[in-house]
Amino acid sequence: MSKRLTENKPADTPVTAARPVKNTDTLPRRIASWLGLLLLIAFPGVTYFIEPRFGVAASACLLILATLLRILYKPNALTGIMAMVTAILGILVALSQSLLMLKFWPVLAVILVIFALFIGLGKDDGMVAKAVAGPEGAKTDPQRVYARSLSYVWIVLFVLLGAVAALTCFWGNLKSWAFWNGGVAWFVILIFYGTERAARGFILRDLERQAEKNRATLQQMQQKK
């Protein structure tokens, strides 16, 4: 009997080792990404200096290069769309030699960011939710409430910045355009981000206390019933 059971026992299935995940987060990619980010931030100021000497086409090529370097690190939907829009704009600028069209790049970038913020509204894995709660996104109701409210504030801020950026395309010279889009706008963003980051912990703790108080009140009401 035992011999028959031994003969009918299925053979152990071989365990295949899991393939190691290829790590694309390499140092050269990080360096290229940060270089691209610095070029994008400094693009208006760099354009102010190189456009009179080398023309609009040189600025357009620099813009395309900066966007491609940025997308090398962690490509996603936002950076992919931004790279595509930037490439199309750069080609059109190089062909038409239009400085006005080149000035509209900050406006297009702001529009794409606002679009991404709108898509992430109410989602636990949205752009702002990940910034607030970590890569896995929002897990608690206070985090969701804070991320949604913060998204609205960012949207209003970017709408105002984009409106002024659009005005600098038509009014003022290249110097005023570079001063706003390459200096003042980034300064406003950094000030707001720093203030929000410093106050985030206090606000989240207050929201968590309010949520706990509401849960306790609800439990008391249910017990009375």
Image: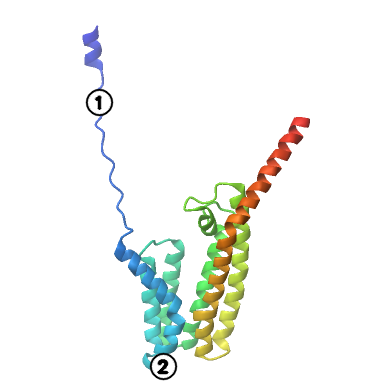
Q: Nearer the viewer, mark 1 or mark 2?
A: 2
Reading the image, the residue beneath label 1 is 12
Label 2: state its secondary structure. helix
Q: Earlier in the sequence, mark 1 or mark 2?
A: 1
Furthest-right residue in view? 225
Q: Could you tell me the amino acid type at mark 1? A: Asp
Mark 2 neighbour class, 10 Å CA radius: few under 14, some 14 to 19, many 20 or more? few
Q: Position of residue 103 (x, y in %)?
A: 49, 83
Q: Quadrant of residue 202?
A: bottom right
Furthest-bottom residue in view? 52
Whether residue 117 can be seen here: yes
Residue placed most toward the observer, 96 or 170 = 170
Q: Could you tell me the amino acid type at mark 2? A: Pro
Label 1: state its secondary structure. loop
Position of the N terminus, as image quadrant, is top left
Count of numbered marks:
2
Given contact means CB atoms under 8 Å apart, are the residues at marks 1 and 2 in contact? no
127 relative position to 55: left or right:
right
Residue shown at the point (43%, 80%) measured from the top left: 43
Q: Position of residue 11 (x, y in %)?
A: 23, 23
Residue placed most toward the observer, 107 or 97 = 107
Residue shown at the point (41%, 93%) measured from the top left: 52
Mark 1 neighbour class, 10 Å CA radius: few under 14, some 14 to 19, many 20 or more? few
Q: Position of residue 130 (x, y in %)?
A: 51, 55
Q: Position of residue 225 (x, y in %)?
A: 78, 30
Q: Quote the CA–CA distance across marks 1 and 2.
A: 74 Å
Residue placed most toward the observer, 213 or 8 = 213
Reading the image, the residue beneath label 2 is 52
Residue shown at the point (55%, 59%) measured from the top left: 119
Judge whether 96 appears above or below 131 on screen. below
